[in-house]
Image (cartoon, rainbow, N blue to C red):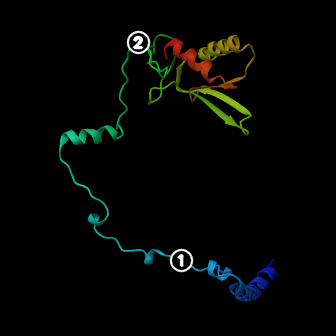
Amino acid sequence: MAALRIFTRSCFPKILQSSAALQSMKHPSPTITEIYKRWSSYKSSPTYKDPSHYTDYEISTDPVEWSYVNRLMRYKVIPKPKTTDTTLPSGWKPATAKPNDYPYFVQRTKNHMVPVYLQRSFRGMRRVTFVRKIEGNIWKLEKELKEHIIATKKRTIGCRVNEMVGEIRFRGDFVTCVKQWLLDKGF
């Protein structure tokens, strides 16, 4: 490998120059030696001028105009959704269950969504559904969820409970089934 590197350092520029001389006689297109030429740099770009040369803008202090800008800005705190019984087009339902209704409680995420996720691995061949943010008797929730999945899907499933984290994992893609069961319970 070192011999090849030494050969290319010593002979390659000569070969390029001779081929460039031949090429320039035949074609007016750029030669190989011109490819290595640096065409621009930051020093060749024009220097910065004041903003009046680039854009036209004005600073407004009108609160009516600012209200349009304020609508586009991100919330600092996610607002609580309205707890209505109306069915929304997205299918989202507010949480109606209280922590003392069941021996377990599944808390919503900060965006008020049900914490049920699908994890894919091994090029999509392994699918694992997991439920997070579980408080209380996690073993009872696991038993009831497992019975519901077996009843709806008509097959046995494997599951793993992580009591310290408050998480249950089911082998397979059961996200819609689990989400619907949790929404029916009011979580």
Residue 185 is at least partly visible in this image: yes
**In the visual, does 141 lie left or right of 42?**
right
Q: Amino acid at mark 2?
A: Asp
Q: Amino acid at mark 1?
A: Trp
Across and down, in percent, residue 154 comes to: 74, 13
Residue 39: which numbered mark, if any?
1
Residue holding disc 2: 85
Secondary structure type for disc 1: loop
Across and down, in percent, residue 125 comes to: 74, 34
Residue 129 against residue 57 in the figure, above or below: above
Q: Residue at x 35, y 37 (%)?
A: 75
Q: Nearer the viewer, mark 1 or mark 2?
A: 1
**Callout 2 crowding tier (Cα within 10 Å): few <14, some 14–19, many ≥20:** few
Q: Residue at x 34, y 71 (%)?
A: 48
Across and down, in percent, residue 106 comes to: 51, 21
Q: Nearer the viewer, residue 67 or 99?
A: 67
Residue 84 against residue 173 in the figure, above or below: above
Determine which quarter of the picture holds residue 68.
Answer: top left
Secondary structure type for disc 2: loop
Q: Nearer the viewer, residue 141 or 147?
A: 147
Across and down, in percent, residue 143 comes to: 65, 14
**In the visual, does 157 lie left or right of 161?**
right
Determine which quarter of the picture holds residue 116.
Answer: top right
